[in-house]
Image (cartoon, rainbow, N blue to C red):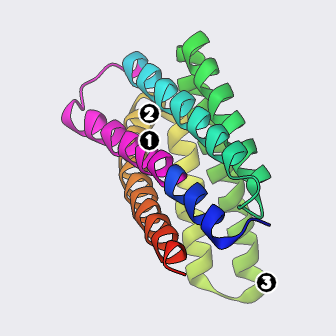
């Protein structure tokens, strides 16, 4: 394990990578918000670029901070997954959009069925209602993929904004921790 001064120096160097990841996520969210009529092809390419760059930054932070982060391997896996997803989006943009839609639809259908079944065993109508909504959402995505893609676009925009803000907040917390270690 590194001494507190060396650990503070590493944290000081890596907080900017975390900050950059957050800024990229927010920029992606703004692009999607400002241009809602953007073609899905362009969205997939922009998302692919974001996933690729975020993955590279994740890999860099994981490797650079492997001595400080107790579970750095998970960040490395996340980074590799982002790079792979970005490449897939560039190579097969149309298929990426439909695959994403169908994955979400199948997940919603399975989750809905499981929640409905659970509601009967625990006698909770709210879980059953959540299951019915989830099942209906999944069926709707499959029945109306165009509208489903627009809705997923809206969700992606919201997710990227929240994720970016959380990464930026985490970056500044890391920066403050590194500064406090410098004063030890």
Asked if residue 53 lies in the magenta stretch, the reply is no
Query: Residue drawn 79% across and 83% down?
Result: 121
User: Do residues under tags 2 and 1 come within 8 Å of each other at their CB atoms?
Assistant: yes
Crowding at dot 2, Cα within 10 Å, few <14 / some 14-19 / many 20+, comes out as: some
* Vertical side of 90 occupied by 43: above or below: below
Q: Regarding mark 1 in the picture, which secondary structure is present there? A: helix
Q: Regarding mark 2 in the picture, which secondary structure is present there? A: helix
Span highlighted in magenta in the image: 14-40
Query: Residue drawn 63% across and 39% down?
Result: 60
The numbered mark at residue 74 is none
Tell me the distance, in whole angstroms, between the alpha carbons under discs 2 and 1: 5 Å
Q: Could you tell me residue 7's position as x and y percent? A: 64, 64
Of the residues under marks 3 and 1, which one precedes in the sequence? 3
**Which residue is under mark 1?**
152
Query: Residue drawn 42% across and 50% down?
Result: 19
The quarter of the picture where residue 169 lies is: bottom left
Tell me the distance, in whole angstroms, between the alpha carbons under discs 3 and 2: 34 Å
The quarter of the picture where residue 83 lies is: top right
Q: Regarding mark 3 in the picture, which secondary structure is present there? A: helix
Magenta span dominant secondary structure? helix
Camera sees residue 182: yes
Q: Could you tell me residue 168's position as x and y percent? A: 40, 57
Query: Which quarter of the figure is the C terminus placed in?
Result: bottom right
Crowding at dot 1, Cα within 10 Å, few <14 / some 14-19 / many 20+, comes out as: some
Q: Looking at the image, is mark 3 or mark 1 nearer the viewer?
A: 1
Which of these two is toward me, 16 or 114? 16
Tell which residue pokes out farthest to the top in this image: 91
Asked if residue 31 lies in the magenta stretch, the reply is yes
**Which residue is under mark 3?**
121
Residue 175 in the figure: left or right of residue 82: left
**Which residue is under mark 2?**
149
């Amino acid at each position: 394990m590194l001494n507190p001064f060396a650990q503070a120096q590493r944290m000081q160097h890596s907080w900017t990578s975390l900050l950059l990841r957050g800024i990229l996520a927010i920029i992606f969210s703004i692009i999607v918000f400002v241009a809602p009529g953007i073609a899905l092809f362009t969205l997939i390419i922009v998302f692919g670029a974001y996933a690729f760059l975020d993955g590279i930054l994740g890999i860099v932070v994981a490797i650079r901070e492997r001595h400080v982060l107790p579970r750095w391997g998970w960040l490395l896996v996340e980074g590799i997954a982002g790079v792979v997803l970005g490449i897939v989006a560039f190579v097969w943009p149309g298929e990426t959009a439909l695959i994403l839609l169908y994955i979400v639809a199948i997940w919603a259908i399975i989750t809905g069925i499981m929640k409905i079944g659970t509601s009967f065993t625990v006698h909770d109508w709210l879980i059953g209602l959540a299951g019915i909504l989830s099942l209906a959402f999944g069926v709707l995505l499959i029945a109306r993929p165009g509208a489903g893609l627009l809705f997923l676009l809206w969700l992606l925009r919201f997710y990227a904004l929240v994720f970016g803000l959380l990464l930026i907040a985490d970056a500044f917390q890391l920066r403050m921790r590194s500064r406090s270690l410098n004063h030890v």
